């Protein structure tokens, strides 16, 4: 792809501008580290373009002090780029050990809010952080998600992160990155660290 030129230009009747402004569905999945980090990198780019950004965290604890959240909130409040809204659902990685029923309901309500925001065109970029988990667990219907994302109005980009992204979502996405793992300190008993995991 030299000089940003695609290797194939589809014969679909769209102009270059129409193709450039297509809303994208992006999936970051796989067992490697960096899925959310890459999504928050996209959020920084969106903020810089002046786009409103909506972050929906589906699994990470509402009690965690996440570095990306603090940075994006400060940037969103700076008045220099786009706005940033941060929505937290659930109680964190121990959902299944605590109360699966209430967490399943929280995931469904979170998805319902995303649907409302997509219909209202509230944000230009949506980060559905760890949303692959509720889909994988069957808490939210994957076919419905694919349909809503396919039919969303306007130019709203959506990035979904998390392991085990369902095949139907992967097939429907425009951009899919599978993060692989070569080595990880946790494999040899190392605990998560401030500044690295959060």
Image (cartoon, rainbow, N blue to C red):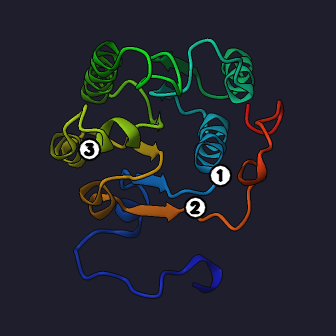
Q: Secondary structure at mark 3?
A: helix
Disc nearer the start of the sequence (2/3) = 3
Of 144 and 185, the residue lying toward us: 185
Question: Contact (CB < 8 A) between labels 1 and 3?
Answer: no
> At 29% from the left edge and 22% from the top edge, which residue is drawn?
104
Specify whether 169 is left or right of 148.
right
List the residue tagged with mark 2. Answer: 179
Establish if 49 lies above or below 10.
above
Residue 74 percent location from the top left of the image: 74, 18
Disc nearer the start of the sequence (1/2) = 1
> At 48% from the left edge and 45% from the top edge, which residue is drawn?
161
Numbered mark located on residue 33 in the image: 1
Of 74 and 111, the residue lying toward us: 111
| Total numbered circles | 3
Residue 47 percent location from the top left of the image: 63, 34
Residue at the extreme front of the image, as rendered: 189
When asked about the image quadrant of residue 11, the answer is bottom left
Q: CA distance from mark 1 to mark 3?
A: 25 Å
Q: Secondary structure at mark 2?
A: loop
> At 55% from the left edge and 56% from the top edge, which residue is drawn?
31
Q: Nearer the viewer, mark 2 or mark 3?
A: 2
When asked about the image quadrant of residue 139, the answer is top left
Establish if 93 lies above or below 154.
above
List the residue tagged with mark 3. Answer: 149
Q: CA distance from mark 2 to mark 3?
A: 22 Å
Q: Residues within 10 Å of mark 2 (few under 14, many from 20)?
A: some
Question: Contact (CB < 8 A) between labels 1 and 2?
Answer: yes
Q: Quadrant of the C terminus?
A: top right
When asked about the image quadrant of residue 36, the answer is top right
């Amino acid at each position: 792809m030299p000089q940003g030129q695609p290797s194939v230009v589809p014969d679909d009747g769209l102009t270059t501008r129409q193709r450039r402004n297509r809303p994208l569905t992006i999936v970051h999945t796989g067992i490697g580290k960096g899925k959310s980090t890459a999504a928050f990198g996209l959020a920084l780019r969106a903020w810089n373009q002046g786009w409103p950004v909506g972050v929906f965290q589906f699994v990470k604890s509402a009690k965690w002090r996440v570095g990306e959240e603090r940075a994006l909130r400060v940037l969103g409040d700076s008045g220099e780029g786009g706005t940033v809204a941060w929505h937290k659902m659930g109680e964190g990685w121990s959902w299944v050990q605590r109360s699966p029923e209430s967490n399943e309901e929280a995931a469904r309500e979170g998805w319902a809010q995303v649907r409302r925001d997509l219909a209202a065109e509230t944000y230009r970029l949506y980060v559905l952080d760890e949303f692959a988990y509720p889909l994988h667990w069957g808490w939210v219907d994957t076919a419905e998600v694919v349909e809503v994302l396919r039919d969303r109005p306007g130019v709203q980009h959506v990035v979904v992160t998390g392991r085990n992204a369902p095949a139907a979502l992967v097939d429907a996405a425009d951009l899919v990155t599978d993060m692989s793992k070569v080595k990880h300190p946790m494999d040899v008993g190392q605990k998560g660290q401030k500044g690295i995991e959060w």
